[in-house]
Amino acid sequence: MPSSGRNIGRRGGGVNGSVDGAAAGTADAAVEFRAFFERHYAELARLARLLTGDSEGADDLAADALVALWHRWDRVRAADHPAAYARGVVANLARSHIRSAIRERRRIALFWAQGPEHADAPDVPAVVDVQQALRTLPFRKRACVVLRHAFDLSERETALALGVSVGTVKSQTSKGMAQLERLLGARAAGELVARRT
């Protein structure tokens, strides 16, 4: 029976630390998981790419999420919304990926700061594309905007995927779109919705 707590993205097992449930080893579970994989892999990789801005790492992140889902497949398939559960795992892994990248950039910046003088002036391009603008949004705003507009999820589905309230989704989506409008102009931000990036 799935737990009512939020365990999305956590490692660990069920009884005695084993993989959750015996279902993960059965042929039926394998067939069911394969169908889930084939149905949702591309969507999860796209979500990972939009959340992290890392095209090359998105496939790896989606694969890592699916491995985590397989390890607790009995819990995932018993969930009311398995795809939302999967999106939540991708969102958590993307958050970890972004944090790791930030830590790495800081280490590199410290290394180069000890070298010859360099200017820290930001490179502000004349035209900022949607993906660059999305990367400037804080993670929660970016996730809400991407799930609502690029994936066409309802506010409720987005809330389920991110483990937040519907009110938070409304607020963060509104603020995220306003920030994109400031960065891109109202017309370009509107194209984000129209194109479903």
Image (cartoon, rainbow, N blue to C red):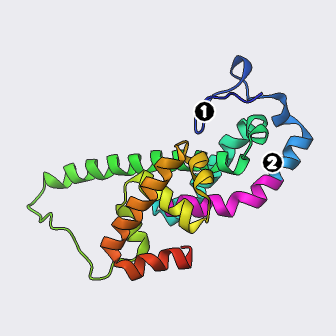
Q: Which corner quadrant of the image does residue 127 belong to?
A: bottom left
Regarding mark 2 in the picture, which secondary structure is present there?
Answer: helix
Identify the residue at the far right of this view.
27
Q: In this image, 10 relative to 26: left or right?
A: left
Residue tagged by mark 2?
Answer: 33
Q: Amino acid at mark 1?
A: Asn
**Quarter placement of the C terminus:** bottom right
User: Which residue lies at the image location 64% right of the left edge and 52% below the top edge?
Assistant: 63
Could you tell me if the residues under marks 1 and 2 are in contact, i.e. CB atoms within 8 Å?
no
Q: Label 2 sits on what residue type?
A: Phe
Check if residue 28 falls in the magenta segment. no
The residue at the point 34 percent across, 76 percent down is 184
Q: Image check: 32 left or right of 60?
A: right
Tell me how far mark 1 sits from mark 2, CA to CA: 19 Å
Residue 140 x/y as whole percent: 44, 51
Return the mark for residue 86: none
Q: Residue at x 81, y 48 (%)?
A: 33
Residue 70: quarter of image:
top right
Left or right for 42, reference 123: right
Q: Which residue is mark 1?
A: 7
Q: Is 25 situated above or below 105? A: above
In the rendered image, the quadrant that contains the N terminus is top right
Q: Which residues are magenta?
A: 35-51
Q: Earlier in the sequence, mark 1 or mark 2?
A: 1
Q: Main secondary structure of the magenta part?
A: helix
Task: Tell me the mark number nearer the camera, choosing from 1 and 2.
Answer: 1
Depth order, front residue of 172/113: 172
- Residue 185 % position (x, y): 34, 78
Q: Is residue 37 magenta?
A: yes
Q: Indicate left or right for 29 with 178 as reference.
A: right
Pick the residue in front: 98 or 81: 81
Q: Is residue 48 above or below residue 81?
A: below
